[in-house]
Image: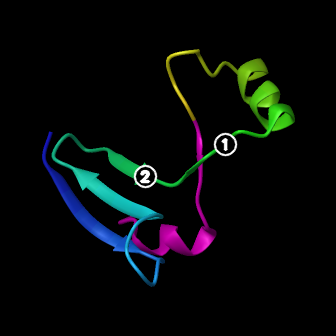
Amino acid sequence: MRLTHLGTTSGGGGCPELYETDRGTYVVQGTRITDPAALATLRERGLPDHETAVEIPKALLRFAKG
């Protein structure tokens, strides 16, 4: 998979970051969600054990091509 960096809202590097892949998808780097209630909701909605969820600011999505 080839990643193309699209943008960040971080002032000093690191997360959050948004990438586009050569497979027609996006990769998002953000803060891992660890809140038990939020994780329970995600699991109820079908988040499998082998996946995780990250939190990003809305402003990061301005870099997404639409």
- In the picture, the disc for residue 15 is none
In this rendering, which labeled residue sits more in front, label 2 or label 1? 1
Q: Classify the position of the N terminus by image quarter.
A: top left
Would you name the residue on which mark 2 appears?
28
The answer for how far apart the CA atoms under marks 2 and 1 are is: 13 Å
Q: Classify the position of the C terminus by image quarter.
A: bottom left
Q: Quadrant of residue 47?
A: top right
In this picture, residue 12 sits left or right of residue 30:
left
Q: Which residues are magenta?
A: 53-66
Q: Quadrant of residue 42?
A: top right
Residue 10 spot, x, y in % from top left: 47, 77
Residue at 40% across, 66% down:
14
| Amino acid found under the numbered disc labelled 1 | Ile
Residue at 20% across, 40% down:
23
Residue 16 spot, x, y in % from top left: 47, 64
| Amino acid found under the numbered disc labelled 2 | Val
The tally of labels here is: 2
Residue 46 spot, x, y in % from top left: 67, 18
Would you name the residue on which mark 1 appears?
33
Say if 9 sits above or below 56 in the image: below
